[in-house]
Image (cartoon, rainbow, N blue to C red):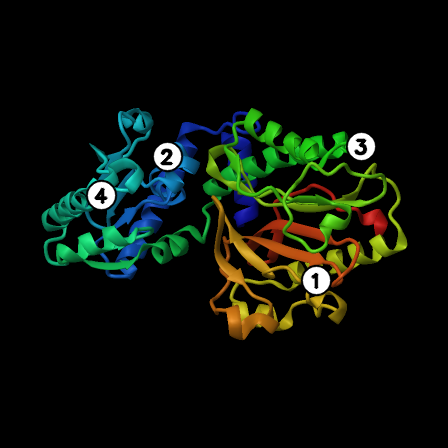
Amino acid sequence: MSAVSTLHAVSMKETESNHAVSDGLMERVRAYRLERVRKELLAQRCPAIILYDPVNIRYATDTSNMQVWTGRNPTRYVVVFAHGPIVAFEFHNCEHVWRGVALDAEIRGATCWNYFSAGPESAPKARAWASEIADLLRQHAPSDMRIAVDRLDPEGVQALLGQGIRIADGQAVMERARAVKSADELVLVQAAVAACEQGIQRMHDALAPGMSEQDLWAHLHYENIRLGGEWIETRLLASGPRTNPWMQECSPRIMKKGELIAFDTDLIGPHGYCADISRTWTVGHVRPTDKQRRLYAAAHTQLHTNMELLRPGMTFREFAQRSWDMPSAYLKNRYSCLAHGIGMVDEYPSVAYYSDWESGGYDGVFESGMTLCIESYIGEEGGEEGVKLEQQVLLTEAGCTPLSTFPFETEWL
């Protein structure tokens, strides 16, 4: 059975509503993700990893605690052994976040040594933290005092080195582990996309001249939170002259009839998975001008040409070389990448334009089971407006299968 047909079979059998899934599916997802982490640790010959990034903790353990806040404040962390236990160090009185998670994990209190938590005592606290990590390694991997870490402040690096521990790149371990999705995991991705599309539809229905960009953006947040989603990583919505150049976050600007409005959802939806979709409309959903139509047609062509090109086994460099040849008028304002991975957030890989290869490209191989976002931004340097489109896809042996069904403005083409 193909990845796509498996996705639909599992979804029909085990999804209880639009966004709720069965306990059995979640147990399989947790087992798959933890196995991916441990296999990657073994491949890197590393006995254990310390996870601070809340998205990595969610991936490995399916536990979540104030993800945005703990992303800035390193106050919970988890140690995962390739052969051995999971030891979770939880924020003050928050052991309850592990209830209902069927993992054999030891829960301890976190030693917090960031300046907010420890002030001038941060250095001795960091040494105490490193001593506890060293004790765990001596107990469970005594022949190899080496550990991967995904995120770590300089004081923590020095404290681990002081214990004789060698440090490996844990973010690379986790990015590679997260790259390929199971059929069960795809059900969760699809639930996030479905919630996001309900938010997009609400935005589409509400869009009218005279409302502000922020008023429109709030509709996406409302639907996401209402349907069990979590947060939105950016505020990328712009109208009229603010659509060129791209990467302008929403503002109090009042939108005018007939001008372009473009957005990029970057939405963390139900179950912690990301839905990353971009569309461009006219304010009031009126007929676009000829110039707006030309911009849209170029973006639509770039997006769909590159989706049709992509296959498993293709290298990132080959994809960049063979991708849609962007007209020179749009090159200066091109998007930052041609495509990127997507899972719980933006993930490995990020594929550079071939013109940027020497300065920002890296090679690798596309694999079946990756979920990706294919990107396009079209806007002339100094132009009045621009068009942003993005499609989230599953890569199968047959190529790209869209995960989003929200329509494009094909009548503009």
Q: What element carries label 3?
A: loop
Type of amino acid under label 1: Thr
The numbered mark, 1 or 3, whose residue comes first in the sequence reads: 3
Q: How far apart are marks 2 and 4 (CA)?
A: 38 Å
Q: How far apart are marks 4 and 1 (CA)?
A: 53 Å
Q: Answer yes or no: do the residues labelled 2 and 1 have beta carbons within 8 Å?
A: no
| Mark 2 crowdedness (10 Å alpha carbons): few <14, some 14-19, many ≥20 | some
Q: Answer yes or no: do the residues labelled 4 and 1 have beta carbons within 8 Å?
A: no
Residue drawn at x 55%, y 37% is: 192
Front-most of residues 171 and 323:
171
| Mark 4 crowdedness (10 Å alpha carbons): few <14, some 14-19, many ≥20 | some
Q: Distance between the residues labelled 2 and 3?
A: 48 Å
Q: Distance between the residues labelled 2 and 1?
A: 38 Å
Asked where in the image residue 284 lies, by quadrant, the reply is top right
Q: Which of marks 2 and 1 is in front?
A: 1
In the image, 126: left or right of 389?
A: left
Q: Mark 2 points at which residue?
A: 27
Residue drawn at x 42%, y 50% is: 178
When the figure is inspected, residue 387 is found, relative to residue 209, above or below; the finding is: below
Asked where in the image residue 287 lies, by quadrant, the reply is top right
Type of amino acid under label 4: Ser
Q: Mark 4 points at which residue?
A: 122
Front-most of residues 404 and 377:
377
Q: Name the residue under label 1.
A: 305
The numbered mark, 4 or 3, whose residue comes first in the sequence reads: 4
Q: How far apart are marks 1 and 3 (CA)?
A: 36 Å
When the figure is inspected, residue 52 is found, relative to residue 110, above or below; the finding is: below
In the image, 214: left or right of 133?
A: right
The circle on residue 366 is none
Q: Mark 3 points at which residue?
A: 210
Q: Nearer the viewer, mark 2 or mark 4?
A: 4
The numbered mark, 4 or 1, whose residue comes first in the sequence reads: 4
